[in-house]
Image (cartoon, rainbow, N blue to C red):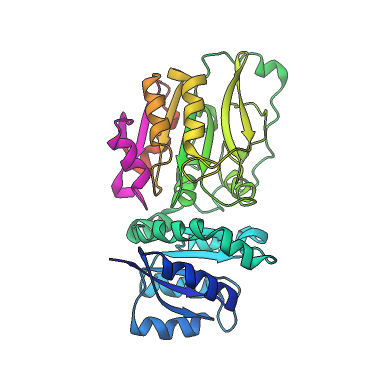
Amino acid sequence: MAIKVLIVDDSAIVRQILGDYIRKDPELELIAVAPDPIFAMEKMRNQLPDVIVLDIEMPRMDGISFLRKIMKESPTPVVICSTLAEENSETTFIALEEGAVEIITKPKVGLKGFLEESFIQITDAIKSAASANMKIARRNVNEKISSNIIQNKQAITSFKESGLSSISATEKIVAIGTSTGGTIALEQVLSKCDKAKTPGILIVQHMPEMFTKSFAKRLNDICEIEVREAVDGERVLPGHALIAPGNRHMQVKRSGAQYVAVVSDGPLVNRHRPSVDVLFRSVAKEAGKNARGIIMTGMGDDGAAGLLEMRRMGAFTIAQNEETSVVFGMPKEAIRKGAVDKIVALENIYREIMDQRF
């Protein structure tokens, strides 16, 4: 059965072009378009959609207010498609916290060309959202750690060269891959990590370009560990987490007795850049048994093959369980491939990261 889609956007160009592409996809069915949330609510009285594609800045009612109303009255997967996703990341984080499951950045100029070039990305996001478990998504949002828990956090710790010289080639690292539902899930996991017990972490979260830096800063503000967007050549240090920049692949390399992050361009892998597989395969090669791989909520199979390579090279591998995943696609595929040593609920993943036995 086709996925029923409602587009809510005040741009006639978006409604027309995106609507045309949805009509051409046999897996999707456009049931209605609306220029603002008030019209959208009228359309929804006739037929409820499976997925809503929602702008944020609109007349009569803004997208965030509409999103809150939807999640309270009839929780429905929502894909945010907005310029604010690029230039006002805080608004986008609010949308994610209120239950949106996918984010697409929409440029202010060249909109028609963007839609024509990005229709596969957009339709994939709609299909991913349709498979989201909204009960889990809402529960994760309700259980998320408030940004007020840790206040007056000190600036990023400066490691002196004398301290770095003690890092050995047996230093442990953790690689994490996630997609749909991952922003809130990562917040829950990383906010529980004790800096003194946490190995260096490398993370690939599928998200738009220019979004990861703000996401990393947000996590850094609420976590005891240090979190930031990765820079090419940066050392992977205990008590630190590096997030792959949007639209850039991230790998790890051994440099003497240490590990460094390698950030680079390159073709899409599994239709993604950054790709979890790219990170996991590099960790398998460079760290082997000194690594731990974790695959979390997300649609598709990105990361499954790379996690299998990690396991074959001696790394301990973990998948988030179905009961706590917003979308179980990525963990499910990794389990199917035989890439997983242990299946863990979201609330216990932080313990696996800090486990000193690997």
In the image, which residues are magenta?
Answer: 315-343
Taking the magenta stretch, the answer to whether it contains residue 107 is no
Image quadrant holding the C terminus, namely: top left
Q: Residue at x 62, y 58 (%)?
A: 89
Q: Residue at x 30, y 36 (%)?
A: 335
Taking the magenta stretch, the answer to whether it contains residue 335 is yes
Res. 48 image quadrant: bottom left
Look at the picture and state if 110 lies above or below 44.
above
Image location (x, y in percent) of residue 30: 41, 73
Image quadrant holding the N terminus, namely: bottom left
Q: Residue at x 51, y 69 (%)?
A: 18
Count of marks overlaid on the render = 0
Left or right, 266 with respect to 54, comes to right
> From this viewpoint, is residue 265 visible?
yes
Image location (x, y in percent) of residue 264: 64, 35
Q: Nearer the viewer, residue 140 or 315?
A: 315
Q: Residue furthest front?
A: 24
Left or right, 334 with respect to 161, comes to left
Image location (x, y in percent) of residue 226: 60, 37
Res. 91 image quadrant: bottom right
Left or right, 163 with respect to 285, comes to right
Q: Residue at x 51, y 26 (%)?
A: 282
> From this viewpoint, is residue 83 visible?
no
Image location (x, y in percent) of residue 170: 51, 14
Res. 27 image quadrant: bottom left
Look at the picture and state if 226 lies above or below 222.
above
